[in-house]
Image (tube, grey):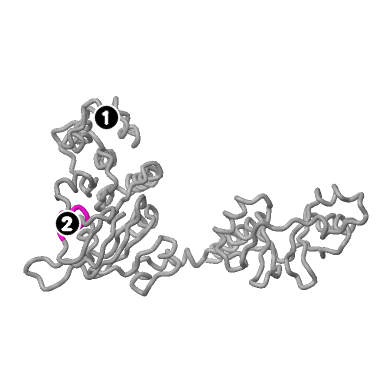
Amino acid sequence: MIEFKNVYKRYRGSEKDVLKGLNLICNEGEITAFIGPSGCGKTTTMKLINRLINPTDGQILVDGKDNATINPVDLRREIGYVIQHVGLFPHMTIAKNVAVVPRLLKWDESKINPRVDELLNMVGLPPEEYRDRYPAELSGGQQQRVGVIRALAAEPKIILMDEPFSALDPISREQLQEDLVQLQKDIKKTIIFVTHDMDEALKISDKIVLMKDGEIVQAASPEEILRRPANDFVKSFIGEKRLQQVRDIPTVADVMAKKPATIYPHRGLAVAMKMMEQRQVDSLVVVDEENHVQGYVTIYDVTRSFDNEDEHVQDILQPFSQTVSPTADITEAIRMLDEGTLSYIPVVCDDGKLLGLLTRGSVVGHVRNVYAQEGLAEQSV
């Protein structure tokens, strides 16, 4: 974990603070993306971590230890660093480039070579083909992959990435973003990623730190940044198009089926079976006379108990394991559907009254209607 505690930075001869009282926690095993306009202080903030520069005031704690108390050379050897223009040594082979830090740390050669091969394989560069090549013989995207694994070679807990993909063409850049997300699932490093691209930050990060004039304007998950931007500056930086896409995501109320098949708990099983036949469903939602959800019965429950005329719906109903609010995000509700055993979830208001059902069919129907409306709108233009 990395923690900034009331950190200020002012360069010698200047009367202006570049950083102004930063307080922030970057969680272990997560990607934290720093983003903001040029000159906002994001790269300066990152360089404080490995002491390429030192704060004027405040503390930076690395795993609970003030990094000012750690020898800068030792600190940097324990922190991976990936820069925009790769920085591979042109006179060294790819294998030697990757092995630079392990050799500085005096690893045994019998450990270094397997580590190099492992890392090359990890990013899709077969060692038998690439370890003896030189940087000039690789594409820009391949060189940047080598830059990433060189930072990983000595198994650091922390990796700093300073706009590592910004010099690449869009296709290579997108591929490397996806590679980083996949790689992080396996390596679980604490990654500080500086970028000027909001799409990149949204795609790769667990937390986005948006900065302006040396201050943190908002630090939150990509989801929260999109849904609850802190102010007009954040909104403008995110962009109206991205915000509109979020606003267009439907709620459960927009998608639910509004006339579910229901039955009262005191009704008999023959009535339940008849109602299922009429509504062409294989289950009924059980509600009381005030429309509060009690549970559900399926055709299988009714069939098993049908010969017992003394039994009623209330005797065989099963409780729902979960319900959903009409204001809930549809993406979360769909996840609940996927994880549940039923093909639907009751939608209830705060007092437990049934409003509708979220079903796979109602979701598909909503999507179909949206596309149909968009198609009509395009035809009318």
Dot 1 lies on which element? helix
Residue at image coords 17%, 33%: 106
Q: Which residue is mark 1?
A: 130
Q: Position of residue 210 (x, y in %)?
A: 31, 65
* Image-based side of 58 in relation to 289, left or right: left
* Image-based side of 60 in relation to 280, left or right: left
Q: Which residue is mark 2?
A: 68
- Labels 2 and 1 touching (C-beta < 8 A): no
138 inside magenta stretch: no
Q: Which residue range is magenta in the image?
A: 47-54
Residue at image coords 37%, 65%: 238
The amino acid beneath tag 2 is Ala
Q: Position of residue 122 (x, y in %)?
A: 35, 35
Q: Nearer the viewer, residue 135 or 186?
A: 186
Residue at image coords 34%, 37%: 123
Q: Position of residue 219 (x, y in %)?
A: 35, 65
Dot 2 lies on which element? helix
The amino acid beneath tag 1 is Tyr
Figure quadrant of residue 261: bottom right
Q: Nearer the viewer, residue 204 or 308?
A: 308
Looking at the magenta stretch, what is its main secondary structure?
A: loop
Q: Position of residue 266 (x, y in %)?
A: 85, 64
Sequence-wise first label, 2 or 1:
2
Quadrant of the rendering where the N terminus is positioned: bottom left
- Mark 2 packing: few (<14 Cα in 10 Å), some, or many (20+)? some
Labels 2, 1: front one: 2
Q: Nearer the viewer, residue 47 or 331?
A: 47
- Mark 1 packing: few (<14 Cα in 10 Å), some, or many (20+)? some
* Image-based side of 226 in relation to 68, left or right: right
Residue at image coords 68%, 69%: 352
